[in-house]
Amino acid sequence: MTQRYWPRQQMRSATQTAAVSTRRRVEKGWHEDCHNWDDYIHDESRPPSAVAVMTDYPFDVTDRWTRTWRTRHWDGATEIPSRWANAVAAVENDLSCWTRKKPLPDFTDHEWDVLVIDSDNVLFQLRQRDSTGWGGYLMTENPLETDRPAASCIVFLADEVQGNLTGHRRIDWPSAGWDVLDPRVVDGTAMWCRTRDATPIARVGALCTDCTTGW
């Protein structure tokens, strides 16, 4: 299952691919080219930002929220949208169980960042508390559209973190040793589903309590 990450990226539908703007495709290239920001920074097709821009990042960040691992309080200029905070909490809960091949590090000294870029997309990262900018242990490979509904936000972040762990850290999650679960929206709820037959197994955010004996 170690090669699961790249096929997952390649399996995105033609409709989804067509819907991604030129700018967003450049953003996706940031990560695939190992943080090559040059194309993005010099993309003259990007309109100038109409709001304040944070300069600690190699891209325009118009809003930011931060919280320490396994705490509830988010620091930011405004209140974080609940659907993004809930997505982080759900994924954080599920990272407590069903990892295979290598253990996760201790994230006690880590913080989550939720970053709004260009006012209409969101990036997430989990980084060490004393680090700054972009480059955490976990980072989303693709931007999340700000208008995504709550369940879709949870599935998006679960999918991105899973791909990051599998593709870059060589950690299978969530895995019982033979089948890595796939996050999907099922009847309006974010669910972990068996890859081989799409059977819902557990709610994203409740994996450790919904699933105690494998699948």
Image (cartoon, rainbow, N blue to C red):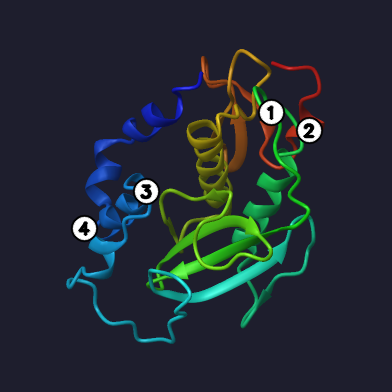
Residue 173 x, y percent position in the rendering: 62, 30
How far, Cα to Cα, is label 2 from label 1? 11 Å
**Which residue lies under the disc numbered 2?**
208
Cβ atoms at labels 4 and 2 below 8 Å apart: no
State the count of labels: 4
In terms of sequence position, does the residue under pointer 2 or pointer 1 come before the other?
Answer: 1
Amino acid bearing label 4: Thr
Dot 3 crowding, Cα within 10 Å, few <14, some 14–19, many 20+: few
Q: Given this view, does label 2 or label 1 mark the residue nearer the observer?
A: 1
Q: Given this view, does label 3 or label 2 mark the residue nearer the observer?
A: 3
**Which residue lies under the disc numbered 4?**
22
Q: Residue at x 24, y 57 (%)?
A: 21
**Which residue lies under the disc numbered 3?**
34
Q: Given this view, does label 3 or label 1 mark the residue nearer the observer?
A: 3
Q: Residue at x 51, y 18 (%)?
A: 1
Residue 20 x, y percent position in the rendering: 27, 52
Cβ atoms at labels 4 and 3 below 8 Å apart: no
Q: Given this view, does label 4 or label 3 mark the residue nearer the observer?
A: 3
